[in-house]
Amino acid sequence: MAKGGFPGFGGNMGNLMKQAQKMQKDMAKLQEELELRTVEATVGGGAITVVATGKKEIKEINIKPEVVDPDDVEMLQDLILAAVNEAIRKADEMVSGEMGKITGGLGGLPGLF
């Protein structure tokens, strides 16, 4: 192997380790921040709204009173389920997007992070 380090890595092993440590520190900080950030999903024309954190915890569920029909509980259940799933999907997108900024796309390599 060449004395300069690993081909294709653009530097020596020490620089690579420094970059990896910085990335790890940045990721830990971002994970803390994402726990505080929220996403909102609304379904049924605004009938149901769900707020979730970047940690995929549901913080709020708001249901408009006119949607509550004792004769059609299944519709309400379906709306809530759709809103929760959409909120979780949006949280995943937010986390992936923010992590991608730090890892530069390396997060897709199995076992790396």
Image (cartoon, helix red, strand yellow):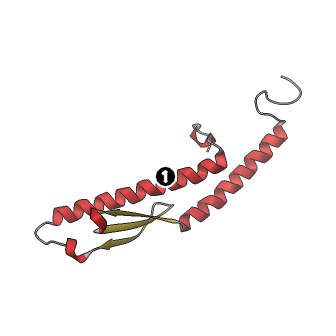
What residue lies at 71% left-to-right and 56% top-to-bottom?
Answer: 25
Figure check: 57 above or below 104: below
Q: Where does the N terminus fall, quadrant-wise?
A: top right
What residue lies at 80% left-to-right and 34% top-to-bottom?
Answer: 10
Query: How far across and how far down the image is residue 48, in percent?
Result: 30, 68
21 vs 45, nearest the viewer:
45
What residue lies at 13% left-to-right and 72% top-to-bottom?
Answer: 70
Q: Quadrant of residue 15?
A: top right
Q: Where does the C terminus fall, quadrant-wise?
A: top right
For disc 1, the marked residue is 93
Q: Residue furthest right?
A: 3
Query: How far across and how far down the image is residue 104, in percent?
Result: 65, 44
Q: Residue furthest front?
A: 45
14 vs 107, nearest the viewer:
107
Q: Secondary structure at mark 1?
A: helix
Left-right relation of 97 to 87 = right
Query: How far across and how far down the image is residue 60, in percent?
Result: 39, 72
Q: Residue furthest top?
A: 1
User: Total number of numbered labels?
Assistant: 1
Query: How far across and how far down the image is residue 59, in percent?
Result: 43, 70
Circle 1 packing at 10 Å, graded few (<14), some (14-19), many (20+), is: some
Q: Residue furthest bottom?
A: 65
Figure check: 113 above or below 6: below
